[in-house]
Amino acid sequence: MDSRMDSVTGFDPVAEHVRTRAALDAAMERLVRLLRAVPDLDAPSGVPVWTVGDVGSHLAAVFLAYGSAFAGEPLEWEGLLPPGDGPLAERIAAVNAASIALFDRADRARLADFLAERGEAFLRSTERLAPDTPVPAPWLGPEVSLPLSAATGMMLSESLVHGLDIARGAGLPWSISPDEARLVLGQAMPSVMPLALDPVRARGVTLAFDLAVGGGPRLAVVVEGGAATVIRDAPPRAYDCRISAAPVSFLLVSFRRAPLWKEVVRGRIRAGGRRPWLATRLNELIASP
């Protein structure tokens, strides 16, 4: 159990963005080394139905998509995404299907080089930009943009979580530190969680969760009127349920890489407040981003 599970800290948005960039840089270096050490790109990965090479190709697409706004080579999304404002799950499924076809069998031998080049280009081209600079993210919805801080946090999360998927398939070591998880949860989740709300399950639901991640951040997650809002360090209010979570555990549960029940049994995620039994609803209402 993390002794800081119930503690939260304030944050400086600019300083935390700088730390997230540094964490992404370090994670990308580890990811490149991992891919170069993979003995068999055709081995099953930690993602059902995807090989290790499929995961690497998906990551290449992620780096390409987030970096395209700054590389002077905008991507053509028409015909790739479902028409209209469909469910996020459909949009992500379409992008995922296209992403694993980005590199054919022969080209996958240079996945590590591609990720290194694209990752470095993203960090270089965004170095002097403010954390709230908009980054187009049409795969998340029509006309959707994320602040640069959230886009950087999502690139960090993709690197960490899919690095784990690759390592599990290749039988190689991979770790995610609490500090890395905190940066993802604080930088990316306030922007991405509302987009990932399941509109069917959220119909008629009014719930407020106080999510306290060990060592920070603290997020107010409110589901009401078929929409969700996520506010960091929100003013005091009444909550239906309080969730205290170790950072890595919450990250892995959020991305469906660890079962919620196991983290609860281990004491890494616990619920309190007026209606603690509602804690499982958060994982049901917010789909994996």
Image (cartoon, rainbow, N blue to C red):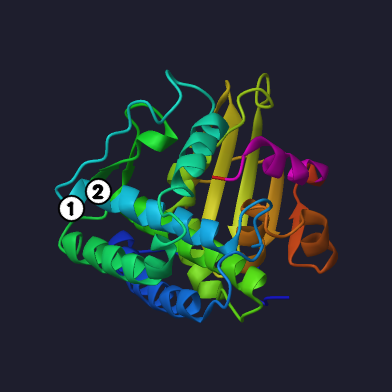
Mark 1 lies on a secondary structure that is loop
Q: Say what amino acid the circle numbered 2 marks.
A: Ser
Vertical relation: 72 (above or below) 201: below
Vertical relation: 61 (above or below) 79: below
Vertical relation: 91 (above or below) 248: above
Q: 140 or 188: nearer the eye? A: 140
Q: Is residue 194 visible?
A: no
Q: Marks 1 and 2, how far apart in space?
A: 5 Å
Predominant SS along the magenta part: helix
Residue 127, percent from left and from top: 19, 65
User: What residue is shown with label 2?
Assistant: 68
Quadrant housing the C terminus: top right
User: What residue is shown with label 1?
Assistant: 71
Q: Say what amino acid the circle numbered 1 marks.
A: Ala
Q: Is residue 101 magenta?
A: no
Vertical relation: 28 (above or below) 56: below
Q: Which residues are the magenta region?
A: 277-288
- Picture quarter containing residue 135? top left
Mark 2 lies on a secondary structure that is helix
Q: Is residue 193 visible?
A: yes
Residue 83, percent from left and from top: 43, 19
Q: State the residue at coordinates (51%, 81%).
A: 37
In-image side of 252 versus 133 (left or right):
right
Q: State the residue at coordinates (62%, 30%).
A: 198
Query: 10 Å neighbourhood of mark 2: few (<14), some, or many (≥20)?
Result: some
> Mark 1–mark 2 contact, CB under 8 Å?
yes
In-image side of 20 versus 246 (left or right):
left
Q: State the residue at coordinates (71%, 44%).
A: 241
In this view, the residue farthest toward the right is 265
Residue 123, percent from left and from top: 25, 65
